[in-house]
Image: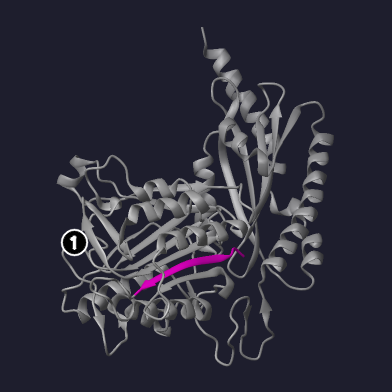
Amino acid sequence: MSERYAILIGINDYNKAPLNYCVNDANAISDTLVNRCLFKENNIYKITSDNNNSIKEVLGAFRQALEDIKITFESHKDSFFFFFAGHGSCTDDKSKIWLQDLEYSIEDIYNEITYTLNPEVQIYLIDACESGGKVITRNKTTSYSLLEKYEATSSGTMLLFACGTNQYAKEYGELKHGLLTNVFLEGINNDDLYDADGFLTPSILQDYVTKETAKISDFTQIPVYENRISGVYPLAQKKISGSNDISGEITVRNRPIYKLSRDLRNNALITIKNTIIEKMDNIKHQIFKQYEKMYEVHTFEQLGFRELKNNYKNIDILSEKLFKIAKRDLNLPLNDVFQEIIIEDNNNSFASIFSRKSDIREYKLDLQGNSVDFRIDVFKAENITESSFGYGIIVYYTKWGISIATLEFRLEWDGYSDRIMKDIQTKTLKYKIADGLEDKVRLLNLEDEFTFITNITEWNENRRTEISAFLESSL
């Protein structure tokens, strides 16, 4: 399970227009991240400044916190949460936060975090005036979107700002918090927002915070948000009655505790990988024995995924199948090994006139993360009259355990070689992390999970028939 890190900034003691509750905001967010959001206390870096403990070099403290986090942060795997409570403004066409008397662009904050850490998922909560005004993600004069840039390096980003241009982020004395922060905390502590599995996603929380903040302020403060988080990201977990520790154990009434620590997951991944490799080798030897001298085998593993994508077509179809079957079985990977990406279709002017705008859906497959292991064997035919094919497994973390996705395909001729994946089949096998897992995987008959073994002869006959028909009818 990936780690979660945070930098929280709250500033009260500005030289001009000091504030009252920003430090309280940062402290309350810190407590909630630990108690409800699976954060470890030593992974949270608080930077607070008030009359009792004034910090003038807030930017320096922020950068030092980033460097400290970088030591243990795993890029493209761990997630990051940034919080700011204080003054903000919109000048020079940019939204800025005030780090004491220094105005610092929100875009620069994004860039420093992203390029230093490369988080897998990153969430920003900024409780400051005009913070959601001219943010770069909504700036139509630029040729790119910051979110698009992030999506190239991570699985998702959520940005939640207190209000737009010419609006003020309010503090309430009776709440002892800023309005946005208070509603955010209420949302995380509202058990009615959690799903059947006891988790709260960023999308559900953002909708609640936006509506409640606007309603409480009589629509004088309307939050601004952007969200591009795909797949399953459980931001918070429902607190279990009688237990203060939810970091890695889930207690179910009248049932034993189910442990899901990082070490247990890693050990299970290694156990399954070693057993599956042995079973894959057995299948390879059987095929070679039956089809001696007809095929050359190419094996692709973690470091070879880029080569696989470069050499074979229809990886996108494989990605879509993996995503849809895992979604159907409630078996999506935690770290977006495969995911659905929704792109707003703003370029089709013809469609916008005559029909409703429809978003474009694409599917991403990333087999190079630490939370996944895979092996794919491709049998390339030595002769054009035989059909090439491949099969493999993908082992990945899920919310409650580990899954094995089986995949198989034949390769169609593209005019030069067998490179087009066809007849792609995949399904998933789910395993809980518990004693006896190794024995269960050893008992798995992998040959029974594949159908391609019985199809090889048919594929070869169809290939020869197709070639013969062409030769007979050609000039």
Q: Is residue 174 left or right of residue 76?
A: left
| Residue placed most toward the observer, 274 or 409 | 274
Q: Nearer the viewer, residue 285 or 310?
A: 310
Query: Crowding at label 1, few (<14), some or many (≥20) Cα neighbours within 10 Å?
Result: some
Where is 183 relative to 62, above or below? below
The part of the image, by quadrant, that contains residue 74 is bottom right
Left or right placement of residue 469 versus residue 375 in this view: left
Q: How many marks?
A: 1
Q: Is residue 457 magenta?
A: no
Amino acid carrying label 1: it is Thr
On the image, the x and y values in percent for residue 50 come to 37, 77
Dominant SS of magenta comes to strand
Q: Is residue 327 visible?
A: no
Q: Is residue 425 above or below residue 89?
A: above
Left or right: 44, with 23 as reference point: right
Q: Can see residue 361? A: yes
Residue placed under numbered mark 1 in the picture: 165
Read off the magenta span.
1-11
